[in-house]
């Protein structure tokens, strides 16, 4: 991860910024699936966990050649009016490292109980004891709203930026540009 490029959303009176970020990320995901996942990671340098908001900038991280090839593959078609694409640039010296990962919320306790009853062949009372209502967890993390290509259902992709750390951790990135182990330069 020696290079990066910023994709910045431009203000638009017709479309709110979160809607544009959802569209940009959906295109990024499809482009990454076609290009080959594992070598490009993402971060949101303007993330604000207090609001929660991902901001207006999507930063791609990778090797300079890899990023240039990816940007040249045409996955950004249709976003030109809504986006300012920066130049591929080297990571500044002294940058920290940050883990940017997906966080999945546990489903509703009711759904989990039905699933447990089907899988284990147990009754409602036993399932309620195994999965209490208190097991539901609400996430206060920024998220993107995406549509599954396989099921057509909408879902929220919750994204967590962990605090910056001094050292880098290796690993691969998913088709969302996220990793449970690999860090990215943070600046």
Image (cartoon, rainbow, N blue to C red):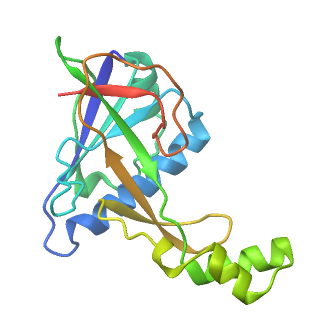
Note whether 126 is above or below 49 in the view shown: below
Residue visible at 86% across and 78% down in the picture: 121
| Residue 114, position as x, y percentages in the image | 71, 82
Q: Quadrant of the N terminus?
A: top left
| Residue 66, position as x, y percentages in the image | 46, 22
In this orientation, does residue 155 appear? Answer: yes
| Residue 27, position as x, y percentages in the image | 45, 53
Q: Quadrant of residue 141?
A: bottom left
Give the left or right position of residue 61, taking residue 8 as reference: right
Note whether 108 is above or below 76 in the view shown: below
Q: Quadrant of residue 38?
A: top right
Residue visible at 52% across and 66% down in the picture: 106
Note whether 73 is above or below 160 in the view shown: above
Name, please, the residue furthest toward the bottom. Answer: 124
Residue visible at 42% across and 20% down in the picture: 169
Give the left or right position of residue 44, taking residue 67 as reference: left
Numbered disc total: 0
* Residue closer to the observer: 15 or 81: 15
In this orientation, does residue 78 appear? Answer: no
| Residue 150, position as x, y percentages in the image | 68, 65
Give the left or right position of residue 65, taking residue 151 as reference: left
Q: Quadrant of the C terminus?
A: top left
Residue visible at 34% across and 27% down in the picture: 184
* Residue closer to the observer: 68 or 177: 177
Name, please, the residue furthest toward the top. Answer: 93
């Amino acid at each position: 991860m020696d290079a990066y490029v910023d994709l910045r959303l431009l203000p638009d009176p017709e479309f709110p910024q979160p809607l544009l970020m959802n569209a940009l990320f959906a295109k990024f995901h499809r482009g990454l699936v076609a290009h080959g996942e594992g070598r490009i990671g993402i971060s949101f340098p303007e993330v604000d966990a207090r609001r929660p908001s991902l901001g207006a900038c999507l930063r791609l991280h990778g090797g300079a050649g890899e990023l240039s090839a990816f940007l040249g593959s045409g996955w950004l078609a249709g976003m030109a009016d809504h986006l300012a694409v920066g130049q591929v640039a080297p990571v500044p010296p002294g940058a920290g490292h940050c883990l940017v990962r997906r966080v999945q919320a546990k489903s509703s306790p009711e759904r989990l109980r039905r699933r447990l009853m089907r899988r284990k062949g147990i009754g409602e009372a036993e399932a309620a004891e195994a999965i209490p209502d208190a097991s539901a967890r609400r996430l206060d993390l920024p998220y993107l709203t995406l549509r599954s290509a396989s099921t057509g259902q909408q879902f929220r992709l919750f994204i967590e930026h962990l605090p910056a750390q001094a050292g880098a951790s290796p690993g691969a990135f998913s088709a969302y540009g996220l990793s449970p182990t690999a860090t990215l330069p943070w600046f």
